[in-house]
Amino acid sequence: MEQLNLSFGLAETRLTVAEGLALLWEHHLNGKPSGRSFYANRKALCRTIGHIYLNDLTKIHVTNMHVRARANGLLGKGIAGPQTIRHDLMLLTLLYNTLRDWKEEGYRIAGFNFATLHIPDRNPTLKIKRPKTHRREVLAARDQFLRFLQHASLRMKQRAYFAIDTGQQEIDLRKLRVTQYDSARDCLVFIRSKTGQRIVLPVTNREREVILEAKEEKREFVLEWTNHINEWRRLKIALGLTFQWRDLRKTTLNETFNQALGDIRPAQKIGGHASPRTTWDHYIVDNGQDLRPFLDQISQTFSEEGLMKKKIGFSKN
């Protein structure tokens, strides 16, 4: 665990934001998917307000931090969009709520007595308006995806195959084990990290080839993710790709929806969503194509030609 420099007062003990986050990670978020997803936010908070004591942190500190972060993002010095800011606020809220619970329970962790912790009753994030996020409606165009494959390394290609062929999230593909392949049914069995839901998907020929290679080499995991982020960023810039890696999952669900002629259920099943509403609201880019047959029929019925045919059909001899 990170070395903590605890400041002891006369009656109560104080922690800085960075020290509190270190304890939160070690004893609450360690090994959890949320710990991995919040890690970049933790680094940013430690860099900007980590030196401030928890009882001294105010709404003004948090607001000013995000004003500077968004300005840097606009200037190209970093990414600080609405989603990043929302996650910062979520992490700070979790930090204060968890430490307050530990204080009330009188926990002693790593030699630290939380009963003496000096922490305010109100979170500094209270009444800070969360910025609205607009959902992305970007899909991976076929020509861009094929151009990306032409320039990608073998391992990157394999990761892309599984991303587009399964429609699963990166976190579940990163921990995909050879043992998840059911050779009798020629299927992969996924347990979603986010919900724990079980998803069974048939494998494609290129997936099967990669799985059998990993099995033959006695690897634990199917895919190799070393240097993935750096290679992806380099290719994205060099090739001018408009889609992000996470858009591959959305592309798969949209292609499934379109091939199912507007039936949302297959895309819902692949996505592992509890309801079709989740799939529709968060993943499907509605281009109105499922309505084309109906509107074409109406257009034909109410065209001059259509009206003439109807008139001829009802004429009397």
Image (tube, helix red, strand yellow):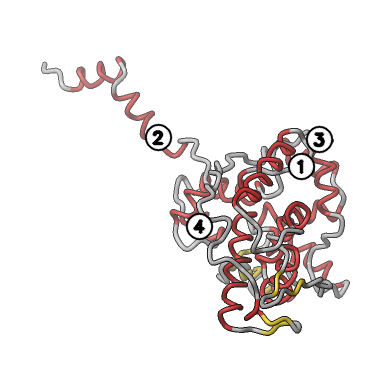
The disc labelled 1 sits on which kind of residue?
Gly
Q: Earlier in the sequence, mark 4 or mark 1?
A: 1
Viewer-side residue, 7 vs 46: 7
Mark carried by residue 268: 4
* Residue 286 location (% of width, % of height): 49, 39
Q: Classify mark 1: helix, strand or loop.
A: loop
Q: Point out the tag, 1 or 2, that comes first from the N-terminus.
A: 1
Looking at the rendering, in which quadrant would you find the C terminus? top left
Q: Write down the quadrant of residue 36 in the picture.
A: bottom right
Viewer-proximal residue among 46 and 35: 46
Q: Place residue 200 in its image quadrant.
A: bottom right
Q: CA distance from mark 4 to mark 1?
A: 34 Å
Q: How far is mark 4 from mark 2, CA to CA? A: 23 Å
Amino acid carrying mark 4 in the image: Gln
User: N-terminal of the two: label 1 or label 3?
Assistant: 1
* Label 2 CA crowd tier, 10 Å (few <14, some 14–19, many 20+): few
Labels 1 and 3 touching (C-beta < 8 A) = no
- The residue to which callout 1 is attached is 78
Residue 209 relative to residue 204: left or right: right
Quadrant showing the N terminus: bottom right
Q: Which mark identifies residue 239?
A: 3
Above/below status of 313 relative to 218: above
Q: Earlier in the sequence, mark 3 or mark 4?
A: 3
Image depth: mark 3 or mark 2 in front: 3
Q: List x then y, in percent, for residue 199.
A: 58, 68
- Are the two marked residues, 3 and 2, in contact with CB atoms closer than 8 angstroms? no
- For residue 293, the mark is 2
Badge 3: residue crowd in 10 Å (few <14, some 14–19, many ≥20): few
| Residue positioned 75% across, 68% down in the render | 19
